[in-house]
Image (tube, rainbow, N blue to C red):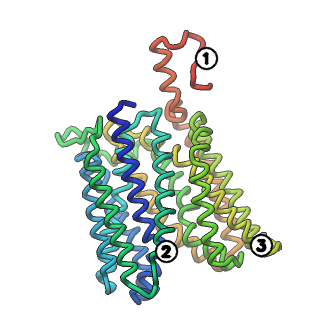
Amino acid sequence: MTRAMGAAMRRIHVGNALSAFGLGFTVPYLYVYVAQVRGLGAMTAGTVLAVFAVAALIVLPFAGRAIVRRGPLPVLLGALVVAALGAMGLGLAADATAVLAAATALGAGQAVMQPALATMIVDCSTAQTRSRAFATQFFLQNLGLGVGGLIGGHLVDTTRVSSFTLLFAIEAAMFLLLAAVLSTVRIPHSSPAGDGSQPSARGSWRQLLGNRAMVQLGVLGFVLFFACYGQFDSGLSAYGVEAAGVSTSALGTALAANTAMIVVAQFAVLKFVERRRRSRVIAAVGLIWAVAWVAAGYAGLGHGSQEMATAAFVSTYALFGLGEAMLSPTVAPLVADLAPEGMAGQYNSAFALVKQLALAVGPAVGGPMAAALHGPYIVTFLLFSLGITALAVRLGRSLTEVQDRPWLAARSRVVAQGAAPRGSARSSRSGV
């Protein structure tokens, strides 16, 4: 990595941490704010949460093309301004129409931020440094969300609307601060296509859908987000309350255990996965999450004490966190490596679209099941986790050796440059 790339990457990570810090102030309290503090009711609050997903689904198909044509930085700066306006609008909105309009702006801005930031990380990293870059991004996101949520919890007061307005103002300020930080970034090898040399939008989507490995990764990604992230704030929490009888404070402890596992384990896990096949790492995550669902099953369906049930439920979230820490340096870099030259933005947006679909469908399916069909809920998502393992093994057959084991590219260059004698590959630093 060159010095310019390193400097750009540091600014991207600082900005990413700031945006996550701002989101942490409001994400845990959005439902309470709309339903109770503004007095708009549970129906409006639920609609607001749905609007975030709908807005993302609308803008993401266009975001990838915009990133390819204009470059990720201009698209990201525009998304940040829209998100800041949405956040401030939510803090000031007093009726349902204003709340829904602000939520649409915030949801659209946040959705576009994801692939734009991912593309900037791709542009400012090499195949060998990309896993560490995405692991650092994920670490800072969770740390920022946790710290922001902790501080926000001390500032918020459900009897004062002004305390929530302050939280949304802080979130908006963090978006604008991120825009200010990232406006100074000079992407070393960004190459927006403004000369018409890139394929049309229809052609680029056709090219993407013709990439067998990318399609398989998209299917795998849907199952990953459906079976894990799509259950966090809906099905799994409902199951914990209804079946396992855990308290609301225990739910908070479980979420804290998830974040703590990610923060503590991220870089230790990174050292483990950096020299493993990506497909095998994802397959291992499926098995870990299967164990997590078994623990959840014991919490709600076993016959142990309440303390044992609570401990098993908290362990479920911690095991999910371990799997997330393994995925962060694996899946996003793989999306980048599957993309042809200049198409990273399109591929990142397509994968973000798959993620949003899973996050929209996951709660709709898991929530009602978890509340009423405890046994079938656990069995269903245990099978989905095992399905992750099967899909990952199948994906591995469609990947090239360098896509599955990216460190091979670095070793090949070292050998080609004469740094290692012919036939003595084991003496290199690749570790294989």
Mark positioned earlier in the residue sequence (3 or 2): 2
State whether residue 55 appears in this view: no
User: Mark 1: which amino acid?
Assistant: Ser
Element under disc 3: helix
Mark 1 surroundings: few (<14), some (14-19) or many (≥20) residues within 10 A? few
Q: Residue at x 49, y 34 (%)?
A: 403
Q: Pick the quarter of the image with the C terminus.
A: top right
What residue is rendered at 54% in x and 13% in y?
420
Q: How many numbered circles are shown?
A: 3
Residue located beneath label 3 in the image? 307
Task: Name the front one of labels 3 and 2.
Answer: 2
Q: Are marks 1 and 3 in contact (CB under 8 Å)?
A: no
Residue closest to the eye, 54 or 6: 6
- Specify the amino acid type for callout 3: Glu
Q: Give the spatial CA distance, label 2 vs label 1.
A: 55 Å
Foreground residue among 43 and 262? 262
Q: Give the residue number, with chain letter if any, for mark 2.
A: 154
Q: Does residue 1 sit above or below 117 in this rendering?
A: above
